[in-house]
Image (cartoon, grey):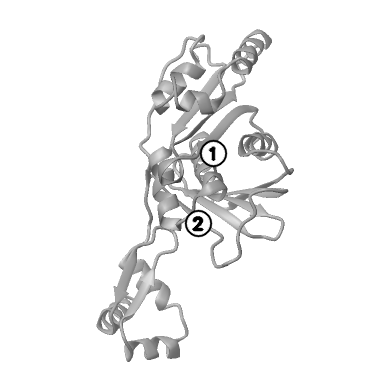
């Protein structure tokens, strides 16, 4: 944050996180770059608005096919390409950007903005922050192609705070307008989140308030898989108990789980006893 309390900055470099997600989804090229940018956007929105809660971001094309990014409060992040569908997601044309998270009172926040053909994720995010969060922000996000689908991914949000005067707003606007493109920064003076933050706030006296680790990861587990299986009709579960082991793959991270009939039977019995 600048020492005069006029601006707050959140910067993230998510290259390793994005590579993990792209490997799990077996995607690359333009679609991989869009997913990497969406993951970065989800991280920035979570840190800006709801750092202690999960933020889910959806990038949906005109036919309803989507990319999904989950940013979790413990620093885990994961992505999905068109969950439940085989048809490809369009990388060009008009899209919708949807942001979901749970408010402190338990209600669901859902913000949706239309993204015109040719607009990038940075423009879409600025529209969302202004319309749904009532936060005036200057945002830059990009993903550059390379090994593992990306060679560098990152971005930043500069948030205008109530203490800002017209003079400092003009100074910051001028500085950001003359700043190197985010793609250049990620391969030059802003290779880490700390370096990126220092460059963005370079002319302004500021203090670092906090840092947060990020990594690719998932919330799936054997218990979650078996819990999901037990939501099926009882006759289907009974058939599984008399059949072969089930091989279940997590769509988000690619982890494989082998659920034997004995495991499922014991798990169901334990849940019955505890209920």
- Circle 1 sits in a helix, a strand or a loop, which is it? helix
Q: Which residue is mark 2?
A: 80
Instruction: Give the residue drawn at x 44%, y 63%.
Output: 251
**How many C-alpha atoms fall within 10 Å of the one at disc 2: few (<14), some, or many (≥20)?**
many
User: Of the residues tagged 1 and 2, which is closer to the observer?
Assistant: 2
Q: Decide: is 133 above or below 217.
A: above
**How many C-alpha atoms fall within 10 Å of the one at disc 1: few (<14), some, or many (≥20)?**
many
**Residue 64 in the image: x percent, y percent?**
67, 60
Instruction: Give the residue drawn at x 57%, y 67%.
Output: 86
Q: Which mark is residue 45?
A: 1
Quarter of the image for residue 16 reads top left
**Residue 248 in the image: x percent, y percent?**
37, 72
Q: How far apart in space, not on screen, are marks 1 and 2 (Cα)?
A: 18 Å
Quarter of the image for residue 235 reads bottom left
- Circle 2 sits in a helix, a strand or a loop, which is it? strand
**Residue 118 in the image: x percent, y percent?**
71, 40
Quarter of the image for residue 161 reads top right
Q: Earlier in the sequence, mark 1 or mark 2?
A: 1
């Amino acid at each position: 944050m600048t020492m005069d309390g006029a601006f707050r900055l959140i910067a993230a470099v998510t290259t390793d996180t994005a590579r993990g997600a792209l490997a799990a989804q077996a995607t690359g090229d333009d679609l991989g770059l869009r997913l990497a940018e969406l993951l970065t956007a989800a991280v920035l929105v979570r840190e800006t608005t709801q750092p202690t809660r999960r933020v889910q971001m959806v990038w949906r094309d005109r036919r309803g096919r989507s990319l999904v990014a989950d940013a979790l409060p413990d620093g885990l992040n994961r992505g999905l390409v068109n969950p439940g569908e085989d048809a490809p997601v369009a990388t060009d044309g008009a899209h919708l950007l949807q942001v979901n998270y749970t408010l402190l009172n338990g209600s669901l926040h859902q913000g949706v903005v239309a993204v015109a053909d040719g607009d990038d994720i940075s423009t879409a995010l600025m529209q969302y922050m202004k319309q749904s969060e009532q936060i005036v922000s200057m945002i830059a996000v990009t993903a550059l192609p390379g090994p593992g689908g990306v060679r560098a991914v990152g971005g930043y949000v500069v948030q205008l705070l109530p203490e800002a005067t017209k003079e400092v707003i003009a100074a910051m606007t001028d500085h950001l307008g003359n700043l190197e493109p985010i793609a250049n920064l990620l391969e030059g003076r802003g290779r880490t989140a700390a370096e990126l933050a220092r460059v963005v706030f370079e002319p302004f006296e500021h203090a670092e308030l906090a840092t947060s680790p990020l990594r690719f990861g998932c919330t799936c587990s054997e218990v979650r898989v078996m819990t999901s299986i037990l939501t099926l009709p009882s006759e289907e579960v009974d058939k599984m108990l008399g059949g072969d082991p089930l091989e279940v793959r997590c769509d988000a991270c690619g982890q494989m789980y082998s659920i034997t009939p004995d495991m499922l039977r014991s798990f169901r019995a334990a849940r019955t006893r505890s209920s």
